[in-house]
Image (cartoon, grey):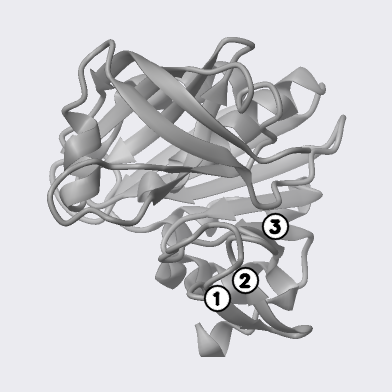
């Protein structure tokens, strides 16, 4: 697999929640190589925005690549305002992705923008005749990308959604919803979200077959700067190069 620098035209920029956009880009070189869980680095050309921003690949086709953009700062705000026809500069695909097993029974757990990394995985599992259920947690109801959730509902047997606060049928976090489920029904678990969420899941899932996609601040995205280094049972690892997907059991969670 080759890392490619590709100029991509914006096909569509669609708002899907109060702070979330789906950015669809014309891409052939990166999109055709990308595996679930991999990411791209995208250049943002605004004031005081020198470094590229990393984004998990939300979806791909033979001619396009999609990113889920959650507005959290200058870079993501700039990306959320791009119009069709704009050109952006991408490097990818980067990192190591999820392991996809055919005919498996999987539980996907995502928090916030962690939903992005799990979308392409969900589609690949569906295409490989694997069954999956999903749990998603958001801060408040208006942050739920309903269109994205509906896509998961078409592929998963069961989709559970929770919010931290606000008017919603279920208030709580993903651990609360996990307690509703018989974990023996699954042979694989995939998790992506904030570090605090992953640390909360670890006591429940540590003895099972679990892959986690870690979020980290990245400067280069290709392992040169060591800015995203974490501690594992096998020594220091770079999230951008050795990850972002790791086995849950290998991460030193007490040092995260």
Q: Is residue 5 above or below residue 196?
A: above
Cα distance between the residues tagged 1 and 2: 6 Å
**Residue under circle 3?**
211
Q: Are there few (<14), some (14-19), or many (20+) residues within 10 Å of tag 3?
A: many
Q: Is residue 248 left or right of residue 118?
A: right
Q: Is residue 28 above or below residue 189?
A: above
Q: Quadrant of the N terminus?
A: top right
Q: Is residue 143 left or right of residue 29?
A: left
Q: Are there few (<14), some (14-19), or many (20+) residues within 10 Å of tag 1?
A: some
Instruction: Name the residue located 22 percent from the left edge and 39 percent from the top edge.
Output: 143
**Residue under circle 1?**
226
Q: Are there few (<14), some (14-19), or many (20+) residues within 10 Å of tag 2?
A: many
Mark 2 vs mark 3, foreground winner is 2
Cα distance between the residues tagged 3 and 1: 22 Å
Image spot of residue 231 (x, y percent): 62, 84
How many numbered tags mark residues here?
Answer: 3
Mark 3 vs mark 1, foreground winner is 1
Instruction: Name the residue located 83 percent from the left edge and 37 percent from the top edge.
Output: 104
The residue tagged with tag 1: helix, strand or loop? loop
* Residues at circles 1 and 2 in contact by the CB criterion of under 8 Å: yes
Image spot of residue 112 (x, y percent): 35, 49
* Residues at circles 3 and 1 in contact by the CB criterion of under 8 Å: no
Q: Is residue 239 above or below residue 109?
A: below
- Chain-order first, disc 3 or disc 1: 3
**The image quarter in which residue 218 lies:** bottom left
The residue tagged with tag 2: helix, strand or loop? strand
- Chain-order first, disc 1 or disc 2: 1
Q: Which mark is residue 213?
A: none
Instruction: Name the residue located 45 percent from the left edge and 65 percent from the top edge.
Output: 216
- Chain-order first, disc 2 or disc 3: 3
Q: Which mark is residue 238?
A: 2
Q: Nearer the viewer, residue 132 or 30?
A: 30
């Amino acid at each position: 697999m080759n890392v490619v620098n590709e100029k991509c035209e914006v096909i569509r920029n669609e708002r899907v929640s109060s702070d979330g956009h789906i950015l669809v880009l014309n891409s052939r070189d990166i999109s055709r190589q990308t595996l679930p869980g991999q990411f791209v680095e995208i250049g943002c050309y605004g004031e005081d925005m020198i470094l590229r921003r990393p984004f998990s690949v939300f979806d791909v086709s033979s001619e396009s690549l999609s990113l889920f953009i959650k507005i959290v700062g200058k870079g993501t705000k700039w990306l959320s305002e791009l119009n069709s026809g704009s050109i952006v500069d991408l490097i990818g695909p980067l990192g190591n992705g999820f392991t996809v097993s055919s005919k498996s029974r999987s539980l996907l757990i995502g928090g916030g923008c962690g939903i992005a990394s799990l979308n392409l995985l969900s589609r690949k599992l569906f295409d490989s005749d694997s069954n999956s259920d999903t749990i998603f947690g958001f801060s408040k109801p208006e942050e739920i990308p309903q269109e994205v959730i509906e896509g998961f509902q078409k592929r998963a047997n069961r989709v559970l959604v929770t919010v931290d606060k606000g008017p919603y049928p279920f208030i709580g976090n993903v651990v609360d919803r996990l307690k509703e489920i018989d974990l023996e029904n699954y042979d694989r678990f995939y998790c992506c979200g904030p570090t605090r969420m992953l640390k909360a899941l670890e006591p429940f899932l540590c003895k099972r077959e679990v892959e986690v996609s870690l979020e980290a601040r990245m400067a280069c995205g290709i392992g040169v700067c060591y800015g995203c280094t974490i501690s594992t049972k096998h020594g220091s690892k770079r999230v951008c190069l050795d990850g972002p997907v790791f086995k849950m059991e290998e991460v030193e969670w007490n040092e995260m």
